[in-house]
Image: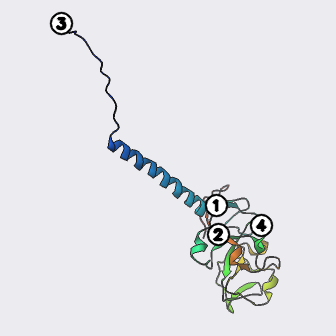
C-alpha cells in the first residue's frame, strides 16, 4: 500500500495547564486587591473640596481645590497648625470651611490688642500674619473644653472663623478632615499644605 506524501494537519486538543490556571487566579486576585486599595485611598485621601473666599491666603486661594484626608482624625486628634475642613455648627447645608487650628482642648484663647494669646502667652506667629482688627468673641478669654478647637484663617482680617459668634469654637464632631494637599491653581503650584 502506498503512503500519501505531503502535509497532514492533525488537530491537537488544547489542554489548560495548571500553571495557566494559577497565573489567572493570581491576576484576578491582584486586580481585586488593586481596586480595593484604590477605593480606600480615594475615600481616605482623595476627597476634594474647594476653597471659598480669601481667608486662607497666601496658603490657599479662592477657588483652589484641595484634597482632604478623612481618616487621619479617626486615628489621631487634630493638632495645632493643622488646616481643618469643617461644617460650621455641623450645618450640612453649608459649604466646607478651611481654617487653621490655633487653640486645642485645655487651652485658653484670647485676643488682646489684635494679637492672639494662648494660655496668657503671646502666640508665636509668622511675620506675614496681620494684626487682627476685630477680636470678636475672643475679646474675652475662652477656655477650650475636651472636644473644642479655636480656628483662624491665615488672612486674619478677611476671615470668618472662631472669632465670629455664628461659628465660635469648632467641635471635633463637625471636623470632616484635614486639608493636606493643594492642587495647582493659576500660577500657584500644587503641594502639601503647611
Which of the 4 image quarters holds residue 178? Answer: bottom right
For mark 2, what is the residue? 177
Which residue is at 24% across, 11% downward?
Answer: 6
Q: Residues within 10 Å of mark 4 (few under 14, many from 20)?
A: few
Is residue 71 among the parts visible in the rendering? yes
Closer to the eye: label 4 or 3: 3
The C terminus sits in image quarter: bottom right
Whichever of callouts 4 and 3 sits on the residue coming sooner in the sequence is: 3
Q: Are marks 4 and 3 in contact (CB under 8 Å)?
A: no
Q: Residue furthest top?
A: 2
For mark 3, what is the residue? 2
Looking at the image, residue 30 sits to the left or right of residue 165; the answer is: left
Whichever of callouts 3 and 2 sits on the residue coming sooner in the sequence is: 3
Whichever of callouts 2 and 1 sits on the residue coming sooner in the sequence is: 1
Q: Are marks 4 and 2 in contact (CB under 8 Å)?
A: no
Q: CA distance from mark 3 to mark 2?
A: 87 Å
Closer to the eye: label 4 or 2: 4
Q: Are marks 2 and 1 in contact (CB under 8 Å)?
A: yes
Please determine whether, in this image, residue 126 is positioned above or below residue 187: below
Q: Are marks 4 and 1 in contact (CB under 8 Å)?
A: no
For mark 1, what is the residue? 47
Element carrying mark 1: strand
Q: Residues within 10 Å of mark 2 (few under 14, many from 20)?
A: many
Element carrying mark 2: strand
Q: CA distance from mark 1 to mark 3?
A: 79 Å
Q: CA distance from mark 4 to mark 3?
A: 92 Å
Element carrying mark 3: loop
Amino acid at each position: 500500500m502506498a503512503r500519501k506524501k505531503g502535509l497532514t494537519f492533525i488537530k491537537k486538543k488544547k489542554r489548560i495547564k495548571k500553571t495557566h490556571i494559577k497565573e489567572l487566579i493570581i491576576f484576578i486576585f491582584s486586580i481585586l486587591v488593586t481596586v480595593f486599595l484604590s477605593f480606600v485611598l480615594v475615600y481616605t485621601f482623595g476627597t476634594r473640596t474647594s476653597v471659598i473666599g480669601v481667608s486662607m491666603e497666601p496658603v490657599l486661594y479662592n477657588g483652589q481645590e484641595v484634597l482632604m484626608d478623612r481618616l487621619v482624625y479617626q486615628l489621631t486628634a487634630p493638632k495645632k497648625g493643622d488646616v481643618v475642613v469643617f461644617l460650621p455648627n455641623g450645618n450640612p447645608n453649608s459649604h466646607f470651611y478651611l481654617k487653621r487650628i490655633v487653640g486645642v482642648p485645655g487651652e485658653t484663647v484670647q485676643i488682646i490688642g489684635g494679637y492672639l494669646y494662648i494660655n496668657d502667652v503671646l502666640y508665636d506667629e509668622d511675620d506675614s500674619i496681620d494684626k487682627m482688627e476685630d477680636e470678636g468673641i475672643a475679646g474675652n478669654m475662652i477656655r477650650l473644653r475636651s472636644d473644642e478647637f479655636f480656628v483662624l484663617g491665615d488672612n486674619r482680617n478677611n476671615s470668618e472663623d472662631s472669632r465670629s459668634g455664628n461659628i465660635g469654637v469648632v467641635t471635633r464632631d463637625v471636623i470632616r478632615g484635614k486639608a493636606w494637599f493643594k492642587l495647582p491653581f493659576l500660577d500657584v503650584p500644587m503641594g502639601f499644605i503647611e
